[in-house]
Amino acid sequence: MMKKRLQEACFERPLLGDGAMGTQLMLAGLEQGNCGEAWNLTHPEKVLGIQRRYVEAGSELLLTNSFGASRIMLQRHGRGGDAAALNRAAVEIARRAFGDQPGYVLGDIGPFGGLLEPYGDFNAAQVRAAFAEQAQALVEAGADGIIIETQTSLEELGLGLDAAREAGAACIVGSLAYDVTLDGATFRTMMGVEPEAAAEFMAGHGADILALNCGTGMDMERARAAAERYRRVSPLPVMAQPNAGQPRLVNMKVVYDETPEQMARGLPALLDAGVNIAGACCGSTPEHIRALRAAREAWWQAKSGPGAPAEARA
């Protein structure tokens, strides 16, 4: 039987995504500042081990280890010529992590790591080419879709969405990183984009799923509020990957100390707000995903009652 497209499957019941990759790579031995995406070729078994732990915890969707695998980002590590190979390997590893289990693989494209002209040194053509190369490699390797994530400007987001569409991605996800304002009254991206404007832009540029992730103060409660604001302007499915609580600086290190149980307590409200795919971002671990899985099952059973699908009663 042909697998349903992600944007269709997530309307049938909420799906569970994965958690942080960068911190897990560092726990596996990656030195801070080094290229984690290079591990797709040099240490594939370590990347596979991380993603398998997420699958074992309950993830039904994995983001590939390709967040910083655009040619522009890789050139900073002397690996620009490996862009296509690293992205293809990222998809292959994520697919292996599911084994015989069904699951969705989203090819991950993060920011190019700079600013566009006139504020920075890169022009739109350079960024478009880097995103196009990355998206093409991810699609050709068999990704079920592309996510353009942790975006703060609509211009860069648009370049990524265009690249995913031109590469023929079966599902396109746009995801922005919102920061809570100093007075705590609202949140917007670093470049001043608010959720309603982002939702309208993504819907108008071919996104199939509207998403949010990361950002300063973007916890479960703020993610719920952002999802509600997306829903006000678009009927498209919503994906949320909030952080594991608020970041704190401890001994010159950023620490996210929201426990899996604390994070899971916020999931029912997130799902009630209409989120179709829930995962986690900075500071999260496979144990956070395990707790979210249990909370999702309890929520689904309460919503569905005795007639819920068998997998919801497992």
Image (spheres, helix red, strand yellow):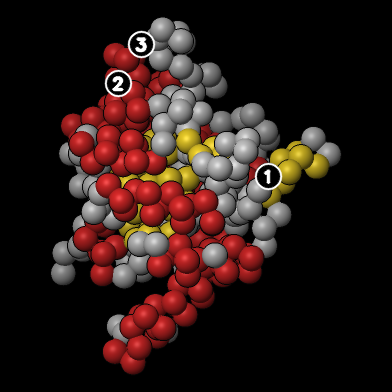
User: Residue 49, position in %: x, y?
Assistant: 54, 56
Measured along the vertical axis of the image, is residue 75 above or below residue 41? above
Measured along the vertical axis of the image, is residue 234 above or below residue 287? above
Marks 1 and 3, Cα distance to the nearest angstrom?
A: 33 Å
Q: How many marks?
A: 3
Measured along the vertical axis of the image, is residue 221 above or below residue 267? above
Marks 2 and 1, Cα distance to the nearest angstrom?
A: 32 Å
Sequence order check, earlier mark of 2 and 3: 3
Sequence order check, earlier mark of 2 and 1: 2
Question: Which residue type carries mark 3?
Answer: Asn
Direction right: furthest residue: 251
Marks 2 and 3, Cα distance to the nearest angstrom?
A: 9 Å
Which one is closest to the eye, mark 1 or mark 3?
1
Measured along the vertical axis of the image, is residue 298 above or below residue 222? below
- Which residue has dot 3 on it? 123
- Which residue has dot 2 on it? 128
* Element type at mark 2: helix
Task: Choose between 158 and 30: the one closer to the eye.
Answer: 158
Which one is closest to the eye, mark 2 or mark 1?
1
